[in-house]
Amino acid sequence: MIPTVVRYAKGEFEVDPRSLLERRHMGPIPLDWTRHQFVTDGNYSDMVLTTWLTDNMHGRFSVSSTSITKGFLVVVGFEQVNDAVMFRLMDGETAWQESQLVQIT
């Protein structure tokens, strides 16, 4: 079990150890994960998509992209089926791009 708070120097410094866990899986998408692929235009940003997934999903995920004629083919793998369903319900294919526009302005 992971504690909710770790304190150093008699409580002067506190860390939430769960924030240190990396949720993005680097490497091939495991076979038992749910995959979702979509095509996006040339404005694809791996960092923006990863940030959006970290903020809006609960489980681990994997992202891979390939440049194609129309833009980018993006494949997102979800460890939890619920995250894959929520990605679709939240219009994740475009919602992450909209979050980028909000941050810039």
Image (tube, rainbow, N blue to C red):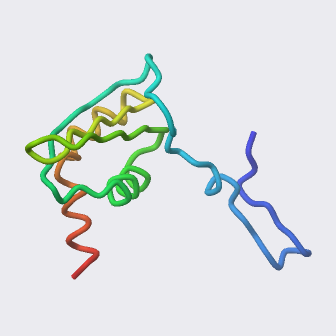
Which quadrant of the figure has residue 7?
bottom right
Q: Nearer the viewer, residue 69 or 50?
A: 69
**Residue 15 occupies which quadrant of the picture?**
bottom right
Q: Position of residue 27 (x, y in %)?
A: 49, 34
Position of residue 7 in the picture relative to residue 27 (left or right): right
Q: Is residue 52 above or below residue 59?
A: below
Identity of the residue drawn at 47% across and 23% down: 30
Q: Position of residue 91 (x, y in %)?
A: 18, 46
Q: Is residue 27 left or right of residue 84?
A: right
Q: Quadrant of residue 1?
A: top right
Tell me where residue 3 appears, x and y as whole percent: 75, 50
Q: Which residue does the image show at 23% across and 55% down from the upper left? A: 44
Camera-nearest residue between 65 and 6 = 65
**Label total for image:** 0
Q: Nearer the viewer, residue 45 or 3?
A: 45
- Residue furthest out toward the top: 31
Q: Farthest residue to the right: give it.
A: 10
Please, which residue is most extreme toward the left here? Answer: 70
In this picture, residue 14 sits left or right of residue 21: right
User: In the rendered view of the protein, which quadrant contains the C terminus?
Assistant: bottom left
The residue at 44%/38% (across/down) is 61
